[in-house]
Amino acid sequence: MSTIRAVTPDDYDLWLPLWHGYQRFYEVAIPEATSRATWRRLNDAAEPMWGALAVEGGQALGLAHYVRHRTTWTEGDYCYLNDLFVSEAARGRGVGRALIRHVYAEAEAMGCSRVYWLTHETNVTAQKLYAGVAERSGFIQYRKRLEP
C-alpha cells in the first residue's frame, strides 16, 4: 500500500523520474530551467502551488501538482490539479485515485470550492478513472501561447 504525502526539498531524486515520465507520456519536453523553477515553487511556502508523491518502499509511484487560485464564480478559491502521473508499473493499483483524493482533502482544508483538471482527449484510460471521481464539465479549452 502506498503512502500519499507532500513533497519535501529532499524528494527531488524521487520526483524527477516521474516528472520526466509525465513529459514522455504527453510527448513534451519542458525545459530544464522550467523544471527547476517548478521544483522550487513546489517547495516554497509563499507559492500557491504544491506537490504530492505516492511512495511505497522508498519508491515514488506517482505525483500530483496542484495550484490554488482566485475565481470570479465563487468566493472560495479553486484548486487546479495541474499534473497527475502514475508510473507505468503502478497503474491499475489505485494510486491515481489516491492522489486525487489527497488533492481533494488539501483543497478542502484550504477552503477551496472546487477542484478541476484537464486531460487530453486521447487519454481514455485516465478518463475512466476521472468519470468515477468527478463530473465532466463539458467545457472545451482554447489557448494561445504568448511569447515573453
Image (cartoon, rainbow, N blue to C red):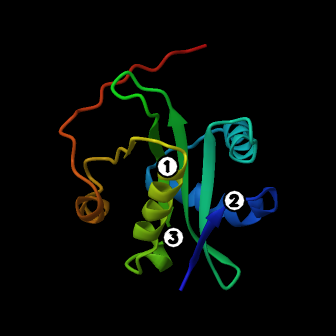
Q: Counting residues from the N terminus, which is met first, the one under dot 2 or under dot 3? A: 2
Say which of marks 2 and 3 sits in front: 2
- Secondary structure under badge 3? loop
Instruction: Name the mark on residue 7.
Output: 2
Task: Provide residue 22's location: percent of width, then percent of height.
Answer: 52, 56
| In this picture, residue 134 sits left or right of residue 46 | left
Instruction: Name the mark on residue 76.
Output: none
Residue at the spot of label 1: 107
Task: Provide residue 38's location: percent of width, then percent of height.
Answer: 67, 41
Tell me the amino acid under the disc marked 1. Ala
Task: Provide residue 144's location: percent of width, then percent of height.
Answer: 40, 19
Task: Work out whether residue 134 can be spotted.
Answer: yes
| In this picture, residue 125 sits left or right of residue 97 | left
Are circles 2 and 3 on residues that touch, CB within 8 Å? no
Residue 5 lies, with reference to residue 79, above or below; the image says below
Which residue is painted at 82% across and 62% down in the image? 10
Which residue is painted at 46% across and 34% down in the image? 77
